[in-house]
Image: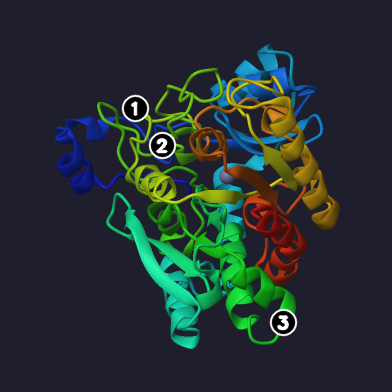
């Protein structure tokens, strides 16, 4: 079931709210509308795609002028009234249930049967500890802070003795809860740059001339919630209750503090999937990771998402190629490096706002704050329904290795 089960104790404790608000219907409750998975046709340009985004529907992926969205009947009607043609792929709850029931027992603390190769938060932490145990001379584990529910926001630093004082590079994953393939991407980067150091001269050279930081799980509360009960929940946002609302969760990648909520690239409706939060950095996760980033001088950065197979660069908040803090030369460098990376993984490269306008995302903030060459990768698949959210675990090796050359380009761009 696609539910938004409330953690009422946490809600009351955090916000001092009366439990009376618990009577409001939530998605998954009998009174809540069923949500459908739709293909929206006619989203032919960035303005139209931004309109679809602003409907409150949950945009999962975009391929050309077709967008895959999860929408309530009301949102779907609104989109039809706006001139879009909608094909319903299925009932979202049913599709999630089917996807979670490949056969075999559901372990309450693991991915659904068949997808156990994906790393839970505990398994991710263990993998990072193992990297440190195996490569004490290269890997260091620390934390950027704690999530709302108290999970450490793990940071793995990869550096050799020779790396000291060398340019810093950052890889971040799993801002959006259900985008589990991205956590695997970050773990793959960790494994490659640690296990590969002794045997691969190119890896050794990259590590020796950089300090590489990896944050595999920027939204651990959300990703754990998304697999609660051993079943997929279709969850995107954080898990912190919204003050003065019955809703839970903010879109962390609309919560960063540059041009936050400025430009129609996020929602002020707490029920929307791109809700920007009550204020910039209202979420402990974005606050902690941004403080961590501000304390460093990252030259280059990729934030991994799924899905659509895109390489995106700032700005997201404006359709203009250049704007305050972004010269034509800088915009050209973003495009040049973005295209170079996309040549290797065969993703589609474009400025973020060419897809649709987003405000308060990590790339705009990282560039404006520190001139970090900061990209978003939307990983596999190019398009899809429920498998777009949840590709089978058998795809992990190919779809993470696919980005090796792009990651190397990014590292070398750091200097
Ligand atoms: Zn995402």
- The residue lying toward the viewer, choosing from 192 and 56, is 192
Element type at marker 3? Answer: loop
The alpha-carbon separation of the residues under discs 3 and 1 comes to: 47 Å
- What crowding class fits label 1: few (fewer than 14 Cα within 10 Å), some (14-19), or many (20 or more)? some
Q: Which image quarter: residue 129?
A: bottom left
Colour scheme: rainbow
Point out which mark residue 278 bears: 1
The residue located at (31%, 33%) in the rendering is: 242
Label 2 crowd bin: few (<14), some (14–19), many (20+), radius 10 Å = many
Gap between marks 2 and 1, in whole Å?
9 Å
Q: Report whether the residue tagged 2 is closer than 8 Å to ligand 1.
A: no
* Mark toward the start of the polypeptide (3 vs 1): 3
Q: Check the image and report above or below for 218 versus 134.
A: above
Q: Earlier in the sequence, mark 3 or mark 2?
A: 3
Q: Which residue is mark 2?
A: 250
Residue 315: x percent and y percent? 63, 29
Residue 115: in sight, yes or no? no
Q: Secondary structure at mark 2?
A: loop
Q: Earlier in the sequence, mark 2 or mark 1?
A: 2
Q: Position of residue 412 (x, y in %)?
A: 70, 58
Q: Residue at x 51, y 47 (%)?
A: 176
> Which quarter of the rendered image does ligand 1 occupy?
top right
Picture coordinates of residue 102 (x, y %)?
62, 68
- Evaluate if marks 3 and 1 touch, with contact meaning CB atoms under 8 Å apart: no
């Amino acid at each position: 079931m696609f539910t938004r089960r409330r953690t009422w104790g946490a809600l009351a404790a955090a916000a001092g709210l009366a439990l009376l608000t618990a009577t409001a219907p939530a998605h998954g409750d009998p009174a809540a509308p069923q949500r459908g998975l739709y293909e929206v046709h006619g989203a032919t340009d960035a303005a139209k795609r931004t309109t679809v985004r602003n409907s409150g529907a949950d945009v999962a992926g975009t391929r050309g002028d077709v967008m895959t969205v999860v929408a309530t009947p009301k949102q779907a009607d609104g989109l039809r009234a706006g001139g879009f043609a909608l094909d319903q792929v299925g009932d979202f709850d049913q599709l999630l249930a089917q996807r979670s029931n490949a056969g075999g027992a559901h372990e309450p603390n693991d991915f659904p049967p068949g997808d156990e190769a994906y790393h839970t938060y505990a398994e991710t932490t263990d993998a990072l500890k193992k990297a440190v145990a195996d490569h004490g001379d290269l890997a260091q584990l620390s934390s950027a802070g704690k999530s709302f529910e108290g999970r450490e926001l793990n940071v793995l630093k990869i550096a050799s003795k020779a790396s000291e004082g060398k340019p810093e590079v950052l890889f971040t994953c799993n801002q959006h809860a259900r985008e589990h393939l991205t956590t695997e991407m970050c773990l793959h980067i960790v494994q490659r740059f640690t296990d590969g150091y002794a045997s691969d001269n190119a890896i050794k050279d990259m590590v020796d001339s950089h300090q590489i930081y990896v944050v595999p799980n920027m939204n651990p509360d959300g990703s754990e919630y998304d697999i609660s009960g051993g079943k997929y929940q279709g969850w995107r946002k954080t898990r912190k209750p919204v003050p003065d609302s019955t809703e839970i969760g903010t879109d962390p990648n609309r919560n960063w503090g540059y041009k936050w909520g400025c430009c129609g690239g996020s929602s002020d409706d707490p029920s929307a999937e791109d809700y920007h939060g009550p204020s910039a950095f209202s979420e402990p996760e974005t606050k902690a990771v941004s403080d961590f980033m501000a304390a460093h001088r990252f030259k280059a950065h990729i934030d991994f998402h799924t899905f659509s197979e895109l390489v995106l660069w700032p700005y997201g908040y404006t359709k203009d190629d250049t704007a305050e803090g972004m010269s034509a030369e800088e915009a050209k460098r973003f495009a040049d490096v973005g295209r170079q990376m996309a040549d290797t993984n065969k993703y589609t490269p474009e400025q973020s706002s060419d897809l649709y306008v987003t405000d308060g995302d990590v790339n705009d903030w990282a560039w404006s704050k520190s001139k970090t060459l900061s990209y978003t990768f939307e990983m596999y698949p190019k398009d899809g329904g429920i498998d777009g959210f949840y590709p089978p675990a058998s795809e992990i090796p190919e779809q993470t290795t696919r980005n090796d050359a792009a990651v190397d380009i990014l590292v070398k761009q750091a200097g």
